[in-house]
Every structure is written in structure tokens, then in C-alpha cells.
Image (spheres, helix red, strand yellow):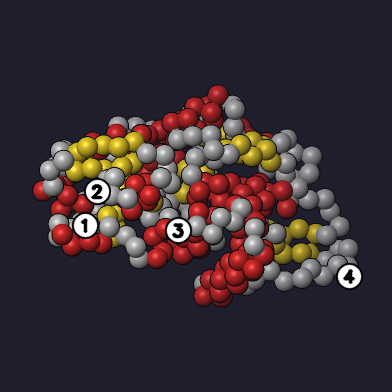
Amino acid sequence: MKQGTLRTLLMAVAALVLAFGVAACGSDDDSSTTAATSTGAGTETTSGALPGEGKPAVTLGTKNFTEQFVLGQLYKQALEARGFRVDLKENIGSTEIADRALRSGQIDMYPEYIGIFNTTVAGDTRLFGSPDEALAAGQAFAERNGFTLLPLTPFTDTDALAVLPDYAAENNLRSVADLAKIRGLKLGAPPEFRRRPTGLPGLARAYGITDVQFSPLTIGLQYDALDNRKIDVADVFTTDGQLTGGRYVVLRDPKNVFGFQNVTPVVSSRVLEAEGPAFRETLDAVSAKLTTEAMQRMNAAVAIDKQQPDAVARAYLEANGLL
């Protein structure tokens, strides 16, 4: 990884911190063994052991795309800074696979998007009026099944449909609804988009988009397919780093088919109790700092600048006083 690029990211993150009125990490005062040290995840005394020391190891899973790799490192490093032992299992697959891994005990937690949790895990396809309503519904299901959903991140990463600017101009496209007039629409998306309520079934129900030539694509390959005109429209994520340059037109979703997609760490309730309150406090502290602009910058650093997720996450945690 290029050190200069990492320093650029760190400076950009620090600017974000100032913009949102968050104080950057300062130096610790080690002159007294009894003084209280404030961290982003709580208050500890320098004379005592870290709150995670002696706790059972936790297995943290992530799904199969850039943002999840970044999120996994953010949560892992923050927890380890407080003494918790974390085994990170990256790239385990889609929500369906992550949910099975959690239920079977192969992982203890993973970051999920609240709308996808409700539709894909809980089977709840209702349209909610706010992220908090969506969280309340998901939490009720989770508690019945031995999970806990932790507080949502400020950022939301929804699916969206993107096209090239000239294609949008030629077909007068501004919203997803405008795609219904196109015959033989070539749409590229992850394989699960074919079946999910927030995928092709939702587009058909809400917008009458049915004449579709569907191309299943690995997440991350949709931009190349769009650039090379192998597809007309791509399913993207609204925090993708590729969207920061203005090279694509993201169509509005006036009927909110893609729902609210703020992130919630999904944690085994048994594990959450065993790890103690500092475990939850640490995860909540990380989630609270994750804005849309911050996630786009971190995703771009990994997907476009080819930096490593662990280095990108560390820079952000340090800038926000979480390490």
C-alpha cells in the first residue's frame, strides 16, 4: 500500500471528523496509574485490565463485498483495542449464507443491512416509514430467534440502479419508474437479486418492470459490465466508491422498493451476554461514527485505490479516537 495515499485518506477522514464536530484522537496521559482514560467506546482506568481480557473469543463474519470487508475490520480492531479476542471470517457470502452461519454457530455476529434483514431473514416485506420502525420490526424477530440487533449506523447503503449518462439522456431516465418503457432491459446484479423482494420481484410489483434480460454478476463486476455496455443498468450500492466521481447516473427510487439499509451488527444474544457491556458499547461507538461520506471514502480507498481494508479501517478509527 502506498503510504502517501494512506496519509491522504487519514487527512480526509480527519477533515470529516472536524466537519461533524468530533474530536480526533489525542495522546494518552500515562503519568498517573489511577487517572481515568476516555475512549470512544467508554471510560477505563489505566490501572485496570482491559474489559475484554479473559472473555471468550468471538467469531465475526462479513459478507462478500468491499464495504463488508471494511466494516469487519472496523469492528474487529475496535474490539481488540479493548482486549476482546476476535476471529474474523471474511467473504463468507450473501445474507442467506451469513444467516445460516450465525444460526449454526459458525459465526457469532456479522454486520447486516436492516432492510435486507427484514425481507431476507425475517421474511417481512412491509414498507416501513423510518429506519427506526424497520429496526423495531427486525429486533422483534431477532429476539425470538436468539439474536440481538444493535443500534443502526447513521449511513444507509441501499441498492440502487445506475446507468451511464448517455444512456440516461437517450432514454430520458430519471427514476427507476422510467425503465418500465424499455423492452429487453439488460440488467446486471448479484444472483440473489433475481429472487429477493428488493430485487426483480420488487421492480415488477412496484414499477411494472418485467421485460428484463437478467445477468447474474459477482459484486464489484457490475461497473465493468456497465462501462463495456454488456448491460444497460446495474444494481449498485449507494456507498460504492465508484459513485463518487460522477461517472454514473443513479436513478431515484420514488416508491422506496430498496427500503432502509442502515447497518446493524447482528449478534448472538448468548454471546452478547457472555462478553459483557463493554463489548456492546464498543460496537455501538464504532457504528455511531459511520456516516455516508465516510463510508464512500473508505470504500473508494479499497475498491479504487487498492488499499487494504485493515489499513483503511485503522486510519479511520485512529482519527475518531476509537483506538
Q: Which residue is labeled 1 in the image?
A: 167
Q: Which residue is labeled 3 in the image?
A: 241
Under mark 2, the amino acid is Asp
Mark 3 to mark 2 CA distance (whole Å): 20 Å
For mark 1, give the secondary structure.
helix
For mark 2, give the secondary structure.
loop
In this view, 231 is above or below 168: above
Numbered disc in front, either 4 or 1? 1
Is the Cβ of the residue at disc 2 closer than 8 Å to that at disc 1? yes
Under mark 4, the amino acid is Ser
Q: What's the residue at 62%, 49% (across, down)?
A: 73
Q: Which residue is labeled 4 in the image?
A: 31
Is the Cβ of the residue at disc 4 closer than 8 Å to that at disc 3? no
- In the image, 226: left or right of 4? left
Residue 157 in picture, x, y percent from top left? 41, 52
Q: Which residue is labeled 2 in the image?
A: 232
Residue 267 in picture, x, y percent from top left? 56, 38
Under mark 1, the amino acid is Tyr
Mark 3 to mark 1 CA distance (whole Å): 21 Å
Between residue 35 and residue 236, name the one nearer to us: 236
